[in-house]
Amino acid sequence: MTDAATAIAAAATRCSNVGRWGPDDVLGTLNHIRDADRVAAAQLVRTGRAFSLSLPYSADGPQRGWRNRNNPVHSMLDTGLDAENGTQGFPHGIGGADDFVAMPLQCSTHWDGLGHIFDHGRAWNGRRAGDVVTSRGDGVTGIETVRGLLSGRGVLLDVGRVIGDGQLPDGFAITEQHLTETAAAHGVEVRRGDLLCVRTGRLTRALDEGWGEYAGGPAPGLSFSTADWLHRTEIAGLATDTWGCEVRPNEFDDAFQPLHQVAIPHIGLFLGEMWNLDELAEACAEDGSHAFWLTAAPIPVTGAVGAPVNPVAVK
Amino acid sequence: MTDAATAIAAAATRCSNVGRWGPDDVLGTLNHIRDADRVAAAQLVRTGRAFSLSLPYSADGPQRGWRNRNNPVHSMLDTGLDAENGTQGFPHGIGGADDFVAMPLQCSTHWDGLGHIFDHGRAWNGRRAGDVVTSRGDGVTGIETVRGLLSGRGVLLDVGRVIGDGQLPDGFAITEQHLTETAAAHGVEVRRGDLLCVRTGRLTRALDEGWGEYAGGPAPGLSFSTADWLHRTEIAGLATDTWGCEVRPNEFDDAFQPLHQVAIPHIGLFLGEMWNLDELAEACAEDGSHAFWLTAAPIPVTGAVGAPVNPVAVK
Amino acid sequence: MTDAATAIAAAATRCSNVGRWGPDDVLGTLNHIRDADRVAAAQLVRTGRAFSLSLPYSADGPQRGWRNRNNPVHSMLDTGLDAENGTQGFPHGIGGADDFVAMPLQCSTHWDGLGHIFDHGRAWNGRRAGDVVTSRGDGVTGIETVRGLLSGRGVLLDVGRVIGDGQLPDGFAITEQHLTETAAAHGVEVRRGDLLCVRTGRLTRALDEGWGEYAGGPAPGLSFSTADWLHRTEIAGLATDTWGCEVRPNEFDDAFQPLHQVAIPHIGLFLGEMWNLDELAEACAEDGSHAFWLTAAPIPVTGAVGAPVNPVAVK
Amino acid sequence: MTDAATAIAAAATRCSNVGRWGPDDVLGTLNHIRDADRVAAAQLVRTGRAFSLSLPYSADGPQRGWRNRNNPVHSMLDTGLDAENGTQGFPHGIGGADDFVAMPLQCSTHWDGLGHIFDHGRAWNGRRAGDVVTSRGDGVTGIETVRGLLSGRGVLLDVGRVIGDGQLPDGFAITEQHLTETAAAHGVEVRRGDLLCVRTGRLTRALDEGWGEYAGGPAPGLSFSTADWLHRTEIAGLATDTWGCEVRPNEFDDAFQPLHQVAIPHIGLFLGEMWNLDELAEACAEDGSHAFWLTAAPIPVTGAVGAPVNPVAVK
């Protein structure tokens, strides 16, 4: 395929949820989660073992400075050495440490908010991009609007393990068929309202070999052609262990993240990036159960178009 | 009471968990949570309704600059206006917004890590404060060490509602008796491994009347005398709707957060501050059920002594 | 006067330098400084005594959070305590301290750049505001474009001392007559290319009494009516000891910094704010000489619309 | 030489200025500048041409993340697009842009403060490192203490041009002989109180070829053996066009910046790094005059151990 613009426009038309939940909607596919789904999902907690799916937020992270995306700078405002030194100015022997962070909101494990990506100047639900996100932040779909909603049934599709040899190679485009084959192999069904985690193994490789071009470079990922499936399955969110969910290089010439351009402004889909699915995947492979309780509550920075999250799966 | 140092030393001796989980322990009271507790807690999900207990992270927050604790500065690296302007340099009509934050890690809803408070130069489990937290961060008990553990049974004690008239006045010291009376009124039992939320109503007042001196000023809160109860009940974490958990002014002359000095380095207790319990409290009052599933997973900033969290309760 | 818009439009027409230095100009009134002026100004160095006109950049600064304008957060990445602790990882006994800052660029003593203020969507020299400053910064008149130019003849008009009793009261509007009377009293002439410093005494009061509403609150300052004089005198820059150069409250109803709206986009004038002129003023009063060598070189943050500066006068 | 520690200790003894200006001194070699020197230096202004010696502060800078030294993140709090959009909330057609920076204080052109480097836990003038720099910053020799002093006679030694072929190769150690030969070739004398600029050409190469390992990698620079000359000449400051002044790799095995360890805590010398001397060097070569007026006033961040500076030379 070489004409990205035409393909994107066609997919956008086919997969549009714009207007589906009314003109004022700010929740997008989170509308797919119903309270009853959470009740059912809670029953998936059988052993009580919990798994954080978050990478650390660290100076040793994957970022390389593209468009100001640096790794976090974590600095101390007070330390244990200061406490020992006795110069903190506190009474009765109490001492304290305190700290500060300066970071892009999407520097490590995060959710993309609905204000993160636009299609020809249009944001989610048909709004003008400039009516949604100004220098004051996202005044409409800021991540704080969904702060209580991102929990429910989580499903892991370990495509890296089922289709690949633990890891998919860079440039491998995961198609609908790969997804359904993986689900079948796992014996798990992808349902409306799911928070779907797709493991490619790309992160495993980065953790073994060093970050290299993990941020923005070649990677396995979802094919552009999965847009219809993402729409049809009515999942609430999609998260992967890669920098940008999509296969890279992208499948069109001169393209940049075309699936995002359909998924966010047209489907209203929440995308999670740089999730560490390895420990969970190991446990799922062991017990054969790929559905679990998942809470992935973003830090509600007012007006944010993306937000740090420490997703926790419990099985 | 006027001699804080003596009282602190005595309480520290009575309530110490130092060494209880071995010399290398970094989890403190999170050791009280067992996987089986999570299985039982998941059964508390009956309606599937979810509640975020997080305040926004916002420039309009409570901070007043004390010891560099400012409110977050959230700035945009790209906006919808830039996308509309067509100067972002992306192909095929895709546009994007991106953002950055600079903030103290304890500026809004957060967990204190075990490296946050010291007693006479000693951190949790008897370690030298300076062996734990240097300018490189907390190399031992950094918040990332507990990133997967903070989920399980949540319990709300709405002391503001049961003992007060919806809100407790500033300076009101909540004693063990207030806590047990509130639990009895709710018909809920506080158990080993619980993540206990104590609502004073102080935040309700701040949200009504403006932040004022919410950060560091007078507030209702736990009496120093509850240290023994906090230890004895074997709760895993304690969170309140106030700036600093403890009653303020503190109950000793010339004192500063004496309960912290016992709770963190000696009990190893995780303290949550500035949690918004109001919506949850309303729902608990309505359905009469004060126990629920709670996930409160901190953002794992490597080496952090405190961390942002968006706690989500599901009933 | 009540109609700000009309008055601004009229002054803009009267005082416009737009196009004066060609369509590509990015220097504005810095065009008024000629190399020969610097040669002459250097002759003003007679005692060699140097005066910094900068306030500290400090957490104890004047900012109150308006539109994200906080005081700087200065944090340490390494300290002397870490060096003493011997855990920095350096050889042969070398130790180091290092630091980080997060701050608005106009939080303390600074220059406004030409991209800082617009009039009805127009920036300096008639350009579209959105063609000049996007989320990528000021791509046309970013402060780095003038990084070598801000030195030359400095002149102090100590209006606070000559017209007031050391300090002018808040709300005092300094008119052209006050300026010329002050110059006459000093025996100094304001010339083309001068970097003009106007002292009101407002900062003296703030340093005595605390910041209070120094940032954005009532203050003495230039009357809107001085626009013509600022234009006619062909000064290169104007700096004051106040938050915003202009008298506050502004002289129109429902107005906000109307003189800025003429001075920056139409005159192309560089405005300096929060300069500490007190020590210099004292020395000028003593020796009776109010002209001096002045270097006020902004930190060239690429694309910045304002920048920190430590101006140094030498007499 | 292989024994760095022994060589450092010997040089420290030979070159020590500790105590020379009394026990309370915080100025170090800035004591060498006298007001009369500034009067003489002002006479060096003959053409009035001014040269900024500062690199931009930019995301495209040389930093690579070593010990949290990232490039600056400059973000916009308001833009021209927002002004055009008419949503800024200001009256009468005024619009504004505003900005924020988060950066290490030594990320681009800067001065090292006297609190930046320690020798075996000792800071400048024999003080305990931990008595000088804690998490609260440098409470003794913070850069604000010298905010008015860094102006006077500047001298350029263009060693890259005189000894090299415009540029010195990486690893080239500049000795006293190279310095004196260069001065002789220029016909310039290095005097007490000078702010000495040494050009190696390393920056020229980086600007041509890309930053690569400019920050911390191999570079020409001053030999450790120049410590005595730096002390004996009684210069006030030394600045180079390299990351770290000293030749790299350093001249000892397993060494890190040994000349710093003598220069800062023992000589009390102000070191400037990453200064862009190219345009000035060109002009000096053309007119044959290598002495000039130099103002290099650091931004006085309270308690900083290093600080951004935009040095301006005028000839």
Image: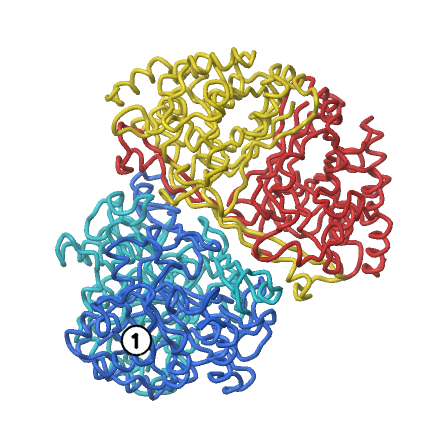
Chain colours: A yellow, B red, C cyan, D blue
Please name the residue that numbered disc 1 is placed on: D294
Q: Position of residue A44 (x, y in %)?
A: 65, 18
Image position, residue A226 (x, y; %): 39, 17
Considering only vertical position in the picture, is C133 above or below B185?
Answer: below
**In the image, is residue B5 above or below residue C159?**
above
Decide which of D156, C132 is in the foreground and name it: D156
Q: Tell me if mark 1 has few (under 14), some (14-19) or many (20+) residues whose alpha carbon lies within 10 angstroms of its own.
A: many
Q: Quadrant of the C terminus of chain D?
A: bottom left
Q: Quadrant of residue B21?
A: top right
Q: Residue B83 at what x, y percent from top left?
A: 31, 34
Whether residue B30 can be seen here:
yes
Residue A139 image point, x, y percent: 44, 34
Residue D209's place in the image compared with D238, above or below, is: above
Q: Is residue B120 left or right of residue C206?
A: right
Instruction: Specify whether residue C288 is in view.
Output: no
Residue A57 placement, left or right of C23: right
